[in-house]
Image (tube, coloured by chain):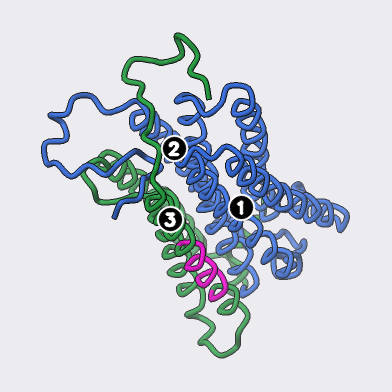
């Protein structure tokens, strides 16, 4: 397969990879960022464990089955998944040095990421209006911590994407910008992986319980 | 696309521009991953709502679908491969998965057995509520 990977360049076939000298900087950078992402995922696993333990500790308040609007969750999931896809297409455009396509991919990624965030904020606002605030029960504290932490990551990702587009505009696709874009797409894809866990554990399993 | 003087770090290299064929195959990889992810997500939402399936088995099925979708994202979007240039990434991922499993399974195991040993009055479903609500 001749695809260029996010992690790095052209596929290496030689068994003597280490004999080629130090790895290119973009591979080292992607590896370091991958370590950060894994540590972030470990932090999320603690939040998932907390949520799973506290999922039934509703203290007489509303439980998950009465709070979840499944249609909204499905739309949110679709938005984030599609923005992850267009983010991949953006890094493909970076590889082909098509600056206009990079802007287009980034714009679509940003719009769908922002749509996801808007839906999540309106969900939170609706819950708080119903009195289902984080201080109501341990279940709701765990819910807002887990889902809110993911939402905070998405917010940071959107800011990062906007900054990257400014850098593409002012500096062009120079190697350092290219590496940062590669890190951004890793970050964005990792957020989608975490969202898979969120919609499964928080929303779908809650409906059943 | 200018290269600013002094902007290159040691070991810095320009990624070779991809050919048309490489770009096309990257597009196919992303699109295949996107299609698979949509299918798995749709099955998850269907399984959570249907009454066709045996209810106690559904959470396990949802967990399997979620793990499968995470695998699809890792392979098609993040491009984790088994190639020699990816060994370090795979090892780090394996360690990450180990820690995630230890944290989640360990927490749930301890808390559930703690609840089971509390011997509080009331129906079994209430035990966790009584224990955990404060």
Residue at the spot of label 1: A83
Note whether A173 is above or below B55 in the view shown: above
Secondary element at tag 3: helix
Please report whichever mark, 2 or 1, sits nearer to the chain's N-terminal start. 2
- Does the CB distance between marks 2 and 3 fall below 8 Å? no
- Neighbor class of circle 1 (other Cα within 10 Å; few <14, some 14-19, many 20+) is many
Note whether A20 is above or below B74 in the view shown: above
Secondary element at tag 1: helix
Q: What color does chain B have in the rendering? A: green
Secondary element at tag 2: helix
Outermost residue, bottom side? B52
Comparing labels 2 and 1, the label whose residue is closer to the camera: 1
Q: What color does chain A have in the rendering? A: blue
Note whether B76 is above or below B124 in the view shown: above
Outermost residue, right side? A129
Residue at the spot of label 3: B24
- Does the CB distance between marks 3 and 1 fall below 8 Å? no
Comparing labels 3 and 1, the label whose residue is closer to the camera: 3
Q: What's the chain of the residue with tag 2?
A: A
Q: Range of the magenta residues?
A: B33-43
Residue at the spot of label 2: A39
Percent position (x, y) of residue A83? 61, 52
């Amino acid at each position: 397969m001749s695809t260029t990977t996010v992690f790095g360049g052209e596929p290496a076939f030689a068994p003597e990879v280490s004999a080629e000298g130090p790895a290119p900087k973009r591979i080292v950078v992607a590896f370091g960022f991958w370590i950060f992402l894994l540590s972030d995922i470990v932090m999320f696993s603690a939040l998932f464990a907390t949520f799973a333990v506290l999922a039934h500790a509703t203290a007489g308040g509303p439980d998950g089955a009465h709070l979840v609007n499944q249609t909204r969750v499905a739309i949110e999931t679709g938005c984030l998944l599609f923005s992850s896809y267009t983010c991949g297409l953006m890094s493909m455009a970076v590889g082909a040095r098509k600056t206009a396509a990079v802007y287009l991919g980034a714009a679509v990624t940003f719009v769908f990421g922002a749509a996801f965030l808007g839906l999540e904020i309106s969900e939170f606002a609706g819950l708080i209006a119903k009195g289902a605030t984080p201080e109501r029960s341990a279940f709701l504290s765990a819910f807002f911590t887990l889902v809110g932490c993911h939402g905070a990551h998405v917010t940071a990702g959107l800011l990062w994407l906007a900054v990257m587009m400014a850098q593409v505009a002012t500096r062009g696709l120079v190697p350092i910008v290219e590496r940062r874009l590669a890190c951004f797409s890793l970050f964005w894809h990792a957020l989608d992986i975490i969202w898979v866990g969120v919609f499964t554990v928080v929303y779908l399993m809650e409906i059943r319980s | 696309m200018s290269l600013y003087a002094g902007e290159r770090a040691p070991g810095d290299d320009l990624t070779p521009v991809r050919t048309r064929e490489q770009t096309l195959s990257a597009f196919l990889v992303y699109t295949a991953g996107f299609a698979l992810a949509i299918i798995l997500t749709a099955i998850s939402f269907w399984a959570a709502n249907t009454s066709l399936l045996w209810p106690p088995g559904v959470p396990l099925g949802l967990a399997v679908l979620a793990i499968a979708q995470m695998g699809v994202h890792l392979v098609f979007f993040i491009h984790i491969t088994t190639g020699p240039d990816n060994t370090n990434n795979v090892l780090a991922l394996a360690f990450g998965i180990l820690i995630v499993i230890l944290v989640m399974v360990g927490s749930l195991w301890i808390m559930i057995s703690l609840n089971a040993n509390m011997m509080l009055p009331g129906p079994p479903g209430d035990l966790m509520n009584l224990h955990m609500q404060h």
